[in-house]
Amino acid sequence: MTDSSTVSAAADGIFDVNDSIVREHVARKGKWIEEENALRQDYEFRQSLSPTAKQAVIIVDAIRKEEIETYWRYPGRVGRQDEERFAGMMFPKARPFIVSTELWKIIQRMPKGSLLHTHWNAMLPFDTIFEILKRTDGMVITASQSLELDLYRENATLRIAHVNNASNNNQTDTEDTPSLHSAGYVPSSQIPLSRAAREWPGGEQAFYAYLKSKVTLSPATSIRHDLGVDDVWRRFTGFFVTAGTMLLYEPVFRQFIQYLLEGLVDDGIHWVELRSDVSLANVVPLGESLPSPDPNFPWRVLSEEIEAFKGSAKGSGFWGVRVIWADRRRNDAAVVIAGMESLLARKQAFSDLFSGFDLVGQEDGKPLADWVPELLWFRNQTDRLNLSLPFFFHAGETVGTGNATDLNLFDALTLPDTRRIGHGFSLYKHPELVRHVKDNDIMIEVCPISNEVLRLSTDILHHPVSALIAQGVPTSISNDDPAIMGQDLPGLSFDFYQMIQGVESLGLGGLGALAQNSVRWSNFEDQDPEAWRRDIRLGAEGSGLKAKRLQEWNAEWEAFCGWVVEEYGRKYL
């Protein structure tokens, strides 16, 4: 029988919340939560927050909760269930609402550090690219078939190019070639871009809306998870043909780089590591119709534009750009080996520009295991030539468990000098690999919106990033292919917003840790594996370039937190 002096029970025998047995339960639970939180990847960062930063965390948490209740919690009425709204909902449906929130304004202002996983030809909003194309002489468009019917338009492959004898601004051209949308159009016939837009049913605005549909996954497509991953990847892969060819004329490419870097700086990003496939080697020089025979030409142009931007007023605080050479995993071995040989040569010519190597494209179908002989050969070559080109592999971008795509993680983490993993969506299922990446300071480049749109997770609420953070796995946030994904911004704000809005345990402190991680795991300079890991572990306490960048980001973070307190403290503290 329980001593009544210890426990005061109600008449029905239910304990009171103040009874010692209940208090002991609450205390044990709290201690357990504290022990688990100490395992989190962001624990040390949270513990080191300044008083101002702690106030900013409280403020942002209050704003988030307020907007969940007053803005996001909106029930759909009977017959209009599609109007249902909630925090963390599918990004394609949430995007129009996100930009009206106060939390969005705060996230846009936040210093985000580095963008480590992004594909060069799927970053800048296509509306911006279209404006560049409109004012560039000599741009033409071709289609793989007539665009007479809607079905033809959906199935056609479009390419943009430059020729010497066409003027994009010539509004009086009288070519006898049938128009792009006529039944008589001959596949692959070049039509001046201005003429194609002018003659399109509905005019120029309708033409560019159609062109945008050929490079952007629509919300309706993105949310069709019932059709599976292969369906969306077929569409997604096809978009890169058109998106890439838009940018391969030197004047367009130069303007593209400037607009892109401006957009990143506007979003609080100081460093970017671009994954660039071999198509960038096909840049056409000013006034020409064919790519330069000089294999160094596109990289020289890129380097010039990076330096020009860094020398501008807006780019004065920008740290720079490096390129991760990304070949297509479904290419023939001879093509990939030729690409590796080209990278080795380019690295010797542009040592500071090239960061590492990756294989890209849908992982399903040709796993990393098929490429082990070539990848080990490549590593032998870099060692022989004393070149630093670590691996930054796409791996585990799958919902499968134990299939070849899931097992890519084992190959990626077994191959020598792998420093980061792209996506790592299935990593949380592998306790031994989780231990390995933690012990060896290997970071996961998480791309939340990309994983939603490509149908791995229905929304941020179902994304495994929370499990990775909770297990202490080093993680940062990237945007992958924001233009194709429908973000219409080149930066990280939408992915950051989805994280803080959808992950209850994150908060501004956790988001800050993810941003700081992006700087800590940036490949700012060539380093051997030992020096790389040393600087990661020393962080801002080190003496090298990485420590300097971390110190700069830390100062920006403090200033940002001060702004949050100044702007919102009176209302929310």
Image: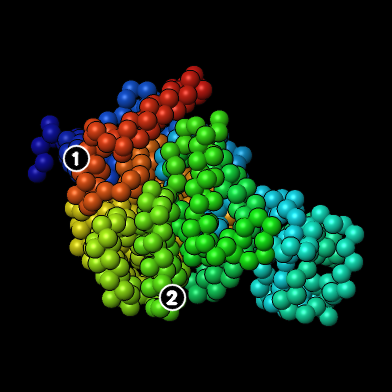
Q: Residue 219 bears which disc, if any? A: none
Q: Is residue 275 in view from this perspective?
A: yes
Q: Position of residue 250 (x, y in %)?
A: 62, 55
| Alpha carbons under labels 2 and 1: distance apart | 57 Å
State the residue position of label 2.
335
Q: Amino acid at mark 1?
A: Lys
The residue shown at (36%, 75%) is 367
- Rendered-image quadrant of the C terminus: top left
Q: Quadrant of residue 286?
A: bottom right
State the residue position of label 1.
31
The residue shown at (35%, 66%) is 396
- Of residues 41 and 367, the one nearer the viewer is 367
In the image, taking residue 484 as reference, residue 43 lies left or right, namely left
Query: Which residue is situated farthest in the front direction here?
Result: 294
The residue shown at (49%, 54%) is 299
Nearer the N terminus, badge 2 or badge 1?
A: 1
- Rendered-image quadrant of the N terminus: top left
Q: Is residue 78 in view from this perspective?
A: no
Task: Give above or below for 267 relative to 568.
Answer: below
Task: Give above or below for 535 relative to 206.
Answer: above
In the image, taking residue 27 as reference, residue 125 lies left or right, namely right
- Of residues 122 and 489, the one nearer the viewer is 122
Q: Residues within 10 Å of mark 2 (few under 14, many from 20)?
A: few
Q: Position of residue 534 (x, y in %)?
A: 20, 44
In the image, taking residue 267 as reference, residue 155 lies left or right, namely right
Q: Amino acid at mark 2?
A: Val
Q: Quadrant of residue 249?
A: bottom right
Q: Secondary structure at mark 2?
A: helix
The residue shown at (78%, 68%) is 191
Task: Give above or below for 286 relative to 40.
Answer: below
Q: Residues within 10 Å of mark 1 (few under 14, many from 20)?
A: few
